[in-house]
Image (spheres, rainbow, N blue to C red):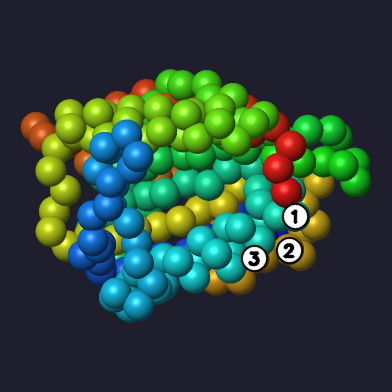
Amino acid sequence: MPNATAEPADRTDHATCLGSEPDVPFGKGKRGQPLKIIVRGSDPKANTILDILENGVFDALSKNVLEALQLTIFVDKDSPDNVLETYTFSFRYTGGSGDVNRRLESLSIDNVGFVADMKYAQTARIGLETIIRRLITLSTFLPTLPNKRNLGIHLFYTEDCPPEYEPPGFTTARNDTLTYPRDGNWRKESQSCGTMDSGWHT
């Protein structure tokens, strides 16, 4: 996550939600898949996460300048670069830079290894469900996270993103290096969740 003087494609912004994850109610998908749902008003931390997503991440997506979103889980709020887990969501758009008809075309999640077709609502829903199932399965093999943990959200931009652009709730990252713990329970392991073709959505 290079500093603000880097080229737009290399520039990243980040936001941090400090504290343990909020307690949120469970819901069930139509196919019976239990999902945690972040409910606005249930907890100040839930509100912070929703504000960052709705006002920051979705702003960058709507402007077609978000190349990737990385979620990091870390323990020490003073050392957010020492992470326990990361999840990277990469976005691809139709058309080239400056194309007025440019739209989100695909989403890939580095930790699951799946391609989901998003050209139509039905295939998009099935693709998202499959990715969620794979993420849940993957998480069952990971070590238990500490009770006190933090969430970092990092944005990576496309080459044609204006250098002065910063979505609401984000600031330019100070560092571009993440470190992972090295002990008996923790080791760096990478898996791909795959790609989702999103078609023409606005």
Disc 1 residue type (three-letter):
Lys
Residue found 67% across the figure and 29% down from its top: 119
Query: Closer to the camera, 179 or 48?
Result: 48
Label 3: few (<14), some (14–19) or many (≥20) C-alpha neighbours in 10 Å: some
Q: Which residue is mark 3?
A: 167
Left or right: residue 87 versus residue 196 is: left
Query: In the image, is 87 to the left or to the right of 20?
Result: right
- Of helix, strand and loop, which one carries label 1? loop
Please tell me which residue is depicted at 66% across the width and 52% down the height of the picture: 61
Secondary element at image label 3: loop
Pointer 1 or 3: first along the chain: 1
Residue extending farthest to the front is: 30
Q: Which residue is mark 2?
A: 165
- Residue 143, percent across and down? 14, 37
Earlier in the chain: of badge 1 and badge 2, it is 1
Q: CA distance from mark 1 to mark 2?
A: 10 Å
Kind of residue at badge 2: Tyr
Kindly give the residue lying farthest to the left in the view shown: 184
Residue 9 visible, this orientation: no
Verify CB contact (< 8 Å) between mark 3 and mark 2. yes
Give me the C-alpha separation between circle 1 and circle 3.
10 Å
**Residue at x 64% of width, y 65% of height:** 167
Q: Is residue 8 left or right of residue 40?
A: right
Say which residue label 1 marks: 63
